[in-house]
Image: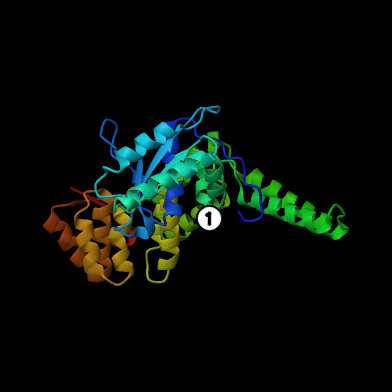
Amino acid sequence: MAGNTPTHIPIPKNHADFERKAVVLFREILKDPSVKRLGREGQEQFGVDLVGYRDEKISKVVGIQCKKKAPTSTLAETEVRDEVKKALTYVPKLQEYIIVTSAKNDTALDQLAQKLSQAQAKKGRKIRIEVWGWGTLEELIDQSPSAQQVFDPGWSPSLQKIQTNLDEVAQALRGQSTATQVQGIAEQIQLQSSIQASILPSEFAESILTAELKRINQRRGFGEAKPSKELAELAARIALGTFLNAPLALRADALERAARSNLAPETIDNAKRLHAEAVKLGLSDTSLYDALLPEAEGNIDETLTRLATIDRPEARAAQFNIIGRHKGAAGALSWLAEQKYAIRCHSACNIDPLSRGIGVQN
């Protein structure tokens, strides 16, 4: 954050926690939503914990190694050399290799990384090697709201804005505040207090968000229900921080549901924004959104083709509803018969199934 001292970010509690949080940060840094942890426990990782592409270009493979250290420990040069040696054997060849550590920044390690990069260049291998200490990571995390949320759940964009304004006022006044400026600061602190008060405690955030999702889903198909609008409003509450203490996966799922429900030509931009926020929170399964997106862009056949490859009740229900919208009730019921599916009503079955958006089952 330009012009401000970075927030003191809590160091992750263990190596696995470090990796999971670093995924969110590097999705922002590399501008690649596909950044992920490499392999599974017990598999050879070649010095790479996370892997992704710079700007989503498959020719620019980036490997990241996370080194969680005890508060007073440092990262040794021998560790850096050992990890780089392994990373050089990774296939396909890495274009960038970054070692991130919870230890303090170290000029000697920066210089070592530069020397190792130059040594590889002399051998005809182009690879950029870097070592980032916790000071560097704090600055980068401080610039990314999504990374702030996973590394420091108590962080608030509003609090950050207040600190920015306080810094600016202090610099401008040099110790002599005017009544107007003092009043402005007081109003912002009052606003911050109001926002903080709306953040649900962790013991309630998960249960209430789960209940809200369940309620919206159960009301689907009823005349007065507007699930797209209700999910969008729920997503707005997540963005404002009401459910900041709910699990990341649950918040990501809620945002993705809102994105899917807004996949229509007139609201596709909203859907894309919501989907992007879900991915930032660590959403991994985007198959249903990816399948529904072509219909919103005018390609119904592509959506039906993609949905046919997903063996989930939501995908079958989506196929049924899409066929019903474009081919009428007769077409949808004919498709049910061809697929040998049965109708599962949400409540009384004397209601037109196409108007209810009902599910289908084998």
Is residue 198 found left or right of 21 in the rendered image? Answer: right
Residue 88 visible here: yes
- Whether residue 163 is situated above or below residue 207 in the rendered picture: below
User: Who is closer to the viewer here, 215 or 34?
Assistant: 34
Is residue 145 found left or right of 325 in the rendered image? Answer: right
- Which residue is at 19% across, 57% downward? 308
Q: How many marks are shown on the rendered structure? A: 1
- Which residue is at 87% across, 54% downward? 176
| Quadrant of the drawing holding the N terminus | bottom right
Residue 336, image x, y percentages: 17, 57
Is residue 58 found left or right of 311 in the rendered image? Answer: right
Residue 180, image x, y percentages: 84, 60
Residue 221, image x, y percentages: 37, 57
Residue 226 visible here: no
Residue corresponding to mark 1: 236
| Secondary-structure class at tag 1 | helix
User: Who is closer to the viewer here, 7 or 73?
Assistant: 73
Badge 1: few (under 14), some or many (20 or more) residues near its Cα, within 10 Å? Answer: some
Q: How is the image coloured?
A: rainbow
Say which quarter of the image contains residue 40. Answer: top left
Residue 303, image x, y percentages: 25, 63
- Which residue is at 26% across, 42% downward? 89
User: Who is closer to the viewer here, 8 or 309?
Assistant: 8
Q: Amino acid at mark 1?
A: Ala
User: Who is closer to the viewer here, 2 or 36?
Assistant: 2
